[in-house]
Amino acid sequence: MESTRRLSDEPETSLQRATHAGPSICGNCAAELTGPYCAQCGQPAHDSARSLGAVLRDGWHLFVHVDGRFWYTLWTLLAKPGQLTLDYFADRRARYVSPVRLYFVISIAFFALTAANSNLIVKSAARPPEVPAAADSVENPGADASECDNIQLRPPWLQARLRAACRRQIADNGKSAAHAFGSYIPKMMFLFLPLVALTMLPLYRRPRHYYVEHVVFFLHIQAALFLVMIGDTLLSLASHWLPRLSGLASIGDLAAAAAAGYAIWCTYRAMRRYYGERRLPTLAKLAIVGIAYQVFLVLTVAATLLLSALTA
């Protein structure tokens, strides 16, 4: 009798509270349940803590919902350019990965693969140092570094910084600048895309479109282009690791041409789908956007090179 009383006096565990709570009360925050999920904390209403089948169902739902949503987003991004942007601003967002997260994940994969491919190219092109070349470098130390004094710029502080950066790059064969460029370029792309989006404001004034629409539009476009370039880079890596498959080189050339064609078609189709204009005006605006894209890309790369040289 006393043992029964002691057991009844002990505090309930979370599992016991959930069991006593019943299906109408959330076991996590005790809020009233009005559907399959708690409106306050988002916890599922089913008994996931008391059934092995429910635990397995939770895992399957997570895999299908998260991973399935990601793959569905990628398919829509590549096969239906402009549809993601259209659905995003039509409040049909639950089925897709958010634009910033999608771009962030794909850009990380792209720049990581590009860095790996560049390292392989550098290593394959490198040759062992020759003794005469080493002797020449010893006989003329600082011959290349003296060329840094030819840099003439205004203001004077920038000239001094660039001359010092030039000497540092010659001393380490440009390794520090290359490393700095690789770390800065993904960040500079976040400035590049909003700049390109500015060109859409005068092109699409009627009907009026908000600036954020153009930014999201180019986040999706650039993510699609990165995906295509990832495929091209993977072919390049495969041709390096599998040199016996000579057909990969020709396939890589065709893939590069196909990627360029897809980039044009993807941007055109996305503009047609999202902005809803006719073919001829869309083609004219596509040409303007293409020129602006190239100009801003050159400026972004130049600014990144300068920043890398000054901070390396």
Image (cartoon, rainbow, N blue to C red):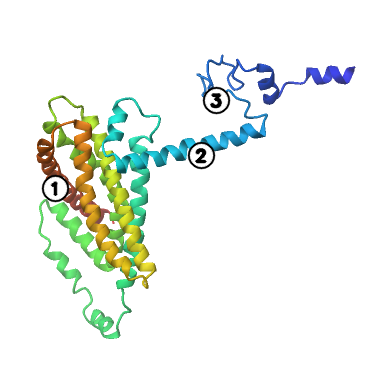
Q: In which quarter of the image is the N terminus?
A: top right
Q: Mark 2 points at which residue?
A: 63
Asked if residue 310 shows in the view, the reply is no
Looking at the rendered structure, which numbered label has been put on residue 18?
none
What amino acid does circle 3 point to? Gln
Looking at the rendered structure, which numbered label has been put on residue 295?
1
Q: Residue at x 26, y 41 (%)?
A: 221
User: Viewed as shown, does residue 113 lie left or right of 221?
Assistant: right
In the depicted view, which residue is nearer to us: 183 or 35? 35
- Residue 199 in percent (x, y) is at 14, 37
User: Viewed as shown, does residue 144 lie left or right of 60?
Assistant: left
Q: Residue at x 29, y 63 (%)?
A: 251
- Residue 215 in percent (x, y) is at 24, 35
In the depicted view, which residue is nearer to us: 257 or 151? 257
Q: Earlier in the sequence, mark 3 or mark 1?
A: 3
Query: What is the spatial separation of the Cα atoms under label 3 and label 1, in whole angstroms?
Result: 49 Å
- Residue 19 vertical placement versus 159 (above, below): above
What amino acid does circle 2 point to? Phe
Nearer the observer: mark 2 or 3; the answer is 2
- Residue 281 vertical placement versus 228 (above, below): above
In the depicted view, which residue is nearer to us: 268 or 295? 268
Q: Quadrant of the rendered structure where residue 148 is?
A: bottom left
